[in-house]
Image (spheres, rainbow, N blue to C red):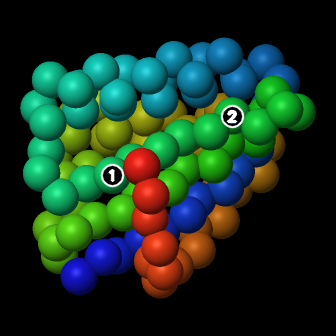
């Protein structure tokens, strides 16, 4: 099973760098723990304040739920955002090199 979700949100201008650092801490933890069954991508768009996260899971279990860095990222997100996250479930149709 491939479960995918895309989350898009905007931060305030003042909080964009802080948000990026919080996201980078998530990736640092993922690099250390190397959870199986997760592909995760985060993009910061050209406007500098819009972030897009794409997560694809191969199993029912979501490794991000066990991540301390991800929990901290989520805890601080309401203070950094200019617009709330818009999570959108998706069906994986094709994948190459991700």
Task: Give the label on residue 39, or none.
Answer: 1
Neighbourhood count class around disc 1 (C-alpha, 10 Å): few under 14, some 14–19, many 20 upward: few
Q: Say whether disc 2 or disc 1 marks the residue closer to the N-terminus.
A: 1
User: Residue 59: x, y in percent?
Assistant: 16, 72
Distance of mark 2 from mark 1, alpha carbons? Answer: 17 Å
Q: Nearer the viewer, residue 82 or 23?
A: 23
Q: Secondary structure at mark 1?
A: strand
- Residue at figure coordinates x 25%, y 54% from the top left: 38
The answer to whether residue 39 is visible is: yes
Q: Please tell me whether mark 2 sits on a helix, a strand or a loop.
A: strand
Q: Is residue 88 left or right of residue 94?
A: right
The quadrant of the picture occupied by the N terminus is bottom left
Is 8 located above or below residue 20 in the figure? Answer: below
Q: Residues within 10 Å of mark 2 (few under 14, many from 20)?
A: some
Q: Where is residue 60 drawn, in percent x and y?
A: 17, 76
Q: Nearer the viewer, mark 2 or mark 1?
A: 1
Please give the name of the residue rendered at 88% of the width and 33% of the height, measured from the top-left corner. 47
Q: What residue does disc 2 label?
A: 44
Above or below, 60 relative to 27 = below
Left or right of 11? Residue 71 is left
Q: Nearer the viewer, residue 15 or 8?
A: 8
Picture coordinates of residue 7, whole percent (x, y): 58, 59
Q: Which mark is residue 51?
A: none
């Amino acid at each position: 099973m491939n479960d995918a979700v895309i989350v898009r949100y905007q931060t305030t201008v003042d909080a964009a760098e802080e948000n990026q650092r919080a996201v980078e801490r998530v990736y640092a933890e993922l690099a250390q723990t190397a959870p199986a069954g997760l592909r995760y991508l985060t993009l910061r768009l050209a406007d500098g304040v819009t972030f897009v996260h794409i997560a694809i899971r191969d199993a029912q279990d979501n490794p991000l739920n066990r991540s301390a860095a991800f929990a901290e990222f989520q805890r601080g997100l309401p203070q950094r955002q200019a617009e709330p996250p818009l999570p959108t479930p998706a069906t994986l149709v094709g994948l190459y090199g991700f």
